[in-house]
Amino acid sequence: MPPGGDALSHGRGLDCWEVRKHNSSEWCHFIRSNPDCRLDGGFLDYLHGVFCVFPPRLLPLAVTLYALWLLYLFVILGVTAEKFFCPNLSAISTNLKLSHNVAGVTFLAFGNGAPDVFSAMVAFSNPRTAGLAIGAIFGYLGLYVFYVLTMVLCTWIHRRQRGDGLAPPGPWEPEMPTDVEEPEPSGTNSGDYAEEYRPLLPSQETSLRILTTALSPLDYRKWRRKPWYWRLFKAFKVPVELVLLLTVPVVDPDKDDLNWRRPLNCLHILTSPLLCVLTLKSGAYGLYQIQGIFPVWGLVTLVASALALIIFITTSNEEPPKYHCVFAFLGFLASAMWINAAATELVNILRTLGIIFQLSNTVLGLTLLAWGNSIGDTFSDLTMARQGYPRMAFSACFGGIIFNILVGVGLGCLLQMTGSQPLVKLEPDSPLVWVLAGALGLSLVFSFVTVPAQCFQLGKAYGACLIAYYLLFLCVALLTEFRVIRFSTP
């Protein structure tokens, strides 16, 4: 047993951030024996790496490497959201003739919130509190359905009054002019995306030639005329873009061939489902053994390979099949899983850095972890707004919250209820719970009053007020947790 082993055994209930209060020789044992040091999901155990793999004298090097990996995860999120997630979402809204508002509260909200719903369902496996009856749970699910149906009905009535029928006026077209034709050198953009996908390929080209051309993430003509710093940043993005091109199909309604690449799209039939099962819950579902014999990923591989072969035989290189729009749904799901996986790694790194710098769990939860958990949604919504779809992004901000709360809590409680236990108990045992609930409610009331008062024409003042409100909430929440501000709870 290492020095101080007995003390550590008695201290297994300690918060993980207290690890650096111990002698450096005890760090690894503390991390391994403390349940609070287990990271949620993710493919890499960053805490084990920094406290067990790196010697204490190389802690600054570990922090530097983690910080660089953190920045690269932001690049992955940006590329995935802008070049794959958002184009497929726009293609879906075009094919289904959805308005931006409806697309925002349905598909974009689902893409942003689905991972959180799974987390909520898992969280309810250990309920700790006071009284949701089963009727109320069905009410939660019904509220979300009612919300979406109301959005669809209002949109339909609005179009009928304008005499437009059911077809929206070009949902693929941006709502406002955007300068995406000339990309910014410091980030990803839709202009970059448009140039890097090749035009309709000649019929005489072989499938191998089509595949290699479609998998090239570089436009060499564009590369030659760009400055050195753009080339440097592009070089960092190329590995990410190549992997994404291999695993995420993109449907582009603005092209005559809808971006149909038969060999690559057939490959996507195999790689996209594999990506989904191997990234959901960090591969736990994909590695599950059916009857203890055959892994799920093996079954997915067999089925997807057979389907890809059928599609390859029954289609041609020159003309997309009638069901090509289905690839937009597949690409939407695959890119959402990429965003979820990258965001999970980002959250785990932020928590690790918080523990290294000895931030308490409460401070971590209110700051770094909250920001990390929201980063995937933020990238998706910001990208949609930058590409000229602000209504879709704005709708998703509220639709995502409603989806997470109503569907997440509703399904989570339903799955945990049994015939002998028809109640899930919820107990707000901390004043901070009331601060969080009150702040969320006040922000929604503020938007409910302010947005109609401005005739739904929102300017920078509205955004500045929301940011100021968040900073005020953060201060009040931290002061409440540290008992500087005291509330009497019911």
Image (cartoon, rainbow, N blue to C red):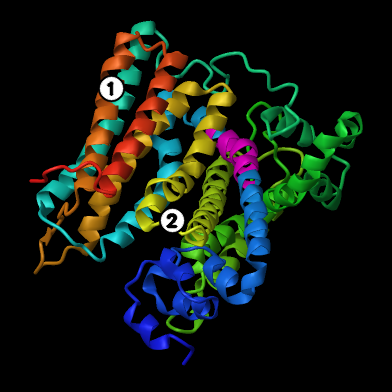
Residue at 42 percent across and 27 percent down: it is 467
Residue pointed to by mark 2: 359
Q: Is residue 85 magenta?
A: yes
* Residue 234 position by quadrant: top right
Query: Any mark on residue 14, and which?
Result: none
Q: Magenta stretch containing residue 283, yes or no?
A: no
Q: Which residues are magenta?
A: 76-89
x 29%, y 37%: residue: 476
Q: Quadrant of residue 305?
A: bottom right
Whole-percent x, y for residue 433 in the image? 22, 47
Residue 297 falls left or right of residue 463: right
User: Which x, y percent locates residue 232?
Assistant: 82, 42
Labels 1 and 2: the sequence-earlier one: 2
**Mark 1 burial class by Cα count in 10 Å: few <14, some 14-19, many 20+:** few
Amino acid at the residue labelled 1: Phe
Instruction: Check disc 2: other Cα within 10 Å, few if <14, some if 14-19, many if 20+.
Output: some
In the picture of the structure, the residue carrying the numbered disc 1 is 446
